[in-house]
Amino acid sequence: MRRKTAAKRLVFVEAAGSLFLNYGFSAVTMESIAAAAKSSKVTLYNYFPSKEELFEAWAFEAGKGAFEQLVAAVDENMSTREVLLRVGVAYLRLITKQEVISINRLIIGEVERFPQLAQRFYAVGPKRTLANLVVAINSLVVRGALVDRDVNKMAIHFKILCEGIMFEKLIWGIEPLPSEDSIKELITEAVDQFMLFYGQKISDKNEG
């Protein structure tokens, strides 16, 4: 995709996202999105054939950068603990992004009327995130640093330990977004607990 075309696409995505947050998915029309993007409806339809595809693109954009950090966190030269800390911090940074929190709240409010939105969001968000966590955990299982169990369940367990009660409180607006120090503290505790369950009972001076 040419740079100019990609930039125009992003304008539509950002305009749609802002309208979705302010008015909800059902109240927003393709006409209003085109107007907010200072473009025509015909041009908008050339990029996105439906409002649902715009929503999916918006949800995908919200995770950009953070997904790459999850993948980059897996380093063969690091100890098991260091890898898990990096993965956990990258994961918590992703799910505590303000835009990601806002999308989750929007989904909760719209899911009964538009169940397909939840499916689209799950595909480009949570499912994609979990797949990256599975890759990270599996890499540690393969190297013999973690016990060889159901990797998918291990990744889900790690995800839950990282979130704790904090994520629910963020979604409900009970607590503010966590600081970087808070994220690191939460993840350190999560990794400690995870390694108690799944860490190999072997002596390894590199696994500090």
Image (spheres, helix red, strand yellow):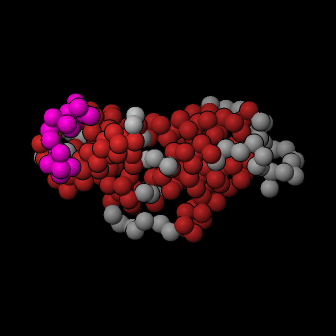
Asked if residue 38 lies in the magenta stretch, the reply is yes
Q: Position of residue 204 (x, y in %)?
A: 86, 48
Quarter of the image for residue 116 reads top left
Residue occupying image coordinates x 61% and y 35%: 135
Asked if residue 4 lies in the magenta stretch, the reply is no
Q: Position of residue 98 (x, y in %)?
A: 38, 59
Front residue of 182/68: it is: 68
Up the image or down, 50 lies above or below 61; here it is above
Mark yes or no: residue 62 visible: yes
Report whether 167 appears left or right of 160: left
Report whether 54 appears left or right of 180: left
Predominant secondary structure in magenta? Answer: helix
Front residue of 17/193: it is: 17
Residue occupying image coordinates x 20% and y 33%: 45
Residue occupying image coordinates x 66% and y 35%: 138
Q: Which residues are magenta?
A: 33-51
Mark yes or no: residue 60 visible: no
Number of labelled discs?
A: 0
Split into 4 quadrants, where in the image is the N terminus?
top left
Quarter of the image for residue 96 reads bottom left
